[in-house]
Amino acid sequence: MPKNSPQKLVEWAKNPNKSQSLLDWLDANEYERKVLFNHKRIPLRLNKVECGQRAAAALFSDDIDLKAAYAANPRYFSNTILDHLRHWGVKYRRFNRKIGSWAARIKYKDIPKGPLRDKINKLMLSTFPQWSRIHVYWRTDSYYNTFWSGKEPNNPPPKSLSPKCASKVVNNGTIVSQKKPTPEYIVIEDTPSPRAISPDCSDGEIMVLNRVAPSLKIR
């Protein structure tokens, strides 16, 4: 791989601010966001490639380290945006299976303060810091959130794990064994969803976990 290739230069995991900038751009560009997140075959004024080009221009055209590479190959950078969003889809589904159906169907801001919210925050910091922001858009989209059934849960948060799920706990991002079930507020073992996982959700697509936690923008 050439030293100055776009593949080498765009390292999202090592530069979490780029992911935050992409989220900011998505927040500010509603139509492009809807196109990029759309998974239905309906005619739209723009397509995903065009929206990816707009996002790439916003993120990379003025970047002191990447603008020369962007000018030389803007198409690749737009593809990088689209690939990154697909990776987010994989990580979002994985995260929701970790936290379980109840938390996956409720707004982040409505999750009560306490052990459940604390554990979700801890899991975000260690695996997917962008979850709380992307959850704003994907929570009610069953393509991304396979737990969504058309309505928010009307029951309180779960008070404990099932014996099956209680065999593992998350401790500083590490899975450790535990002999007896203990009261927990978060599902830490993959939870089957009511629908089949989308075909694009494969372990091979999972990006290297972001170990540098950016500031979380709570919405």
Image: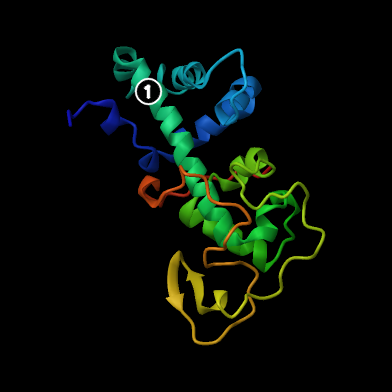
| Residue 199 appears left or right of 140 | left
Query: SS class of the residue under badge 1?
Result: helix
The answer to whether 156 is drawn above or below residue 218 in the figure is below
Picture coordinates of residue 193, whole percent (x, y): 60, 57
Q: Mark 1, residues whose alpha carbon is within 10 Å: few (<14), some, or many (≥20)?
A: many
Picture coordinates of residue 59, whole percent (x, y): 45, 23
| Residue 152 appears left or right of 174 | right
Q: Quadrant of residue 156?
A: bottom right
Residue furthest out toward the bottom: 180
In the rendered image, is residue 12 in sight?
yes
Picture coordinates of residue 150, whole percent (x, y): 75, 46
Q: Quadrant of residue 102?
A: bottom right
Query: Foreground: 219 or 102?
Result: 102
In the rendered image, is residue 217 in sight?
no
The residue located at (58%, 83%) in the rendering is 181
Residue furthest out toward the left: 2
Quarter that holds the N terminus: top left
The answer to whether 92 is drawn above or below residue 48 in the figure is below
Quarter that holds the C terminus: top right
| Residue 175 appears left or right of 165 | left
| Residue 195 appears left or right of 86 | right
Picture coordinates of residue 183, whole percent (x, y): 64, 79
Q: Amino acid at mark 1?
A: Phe
The residue located at (29%, 19%) in the rendering is 69
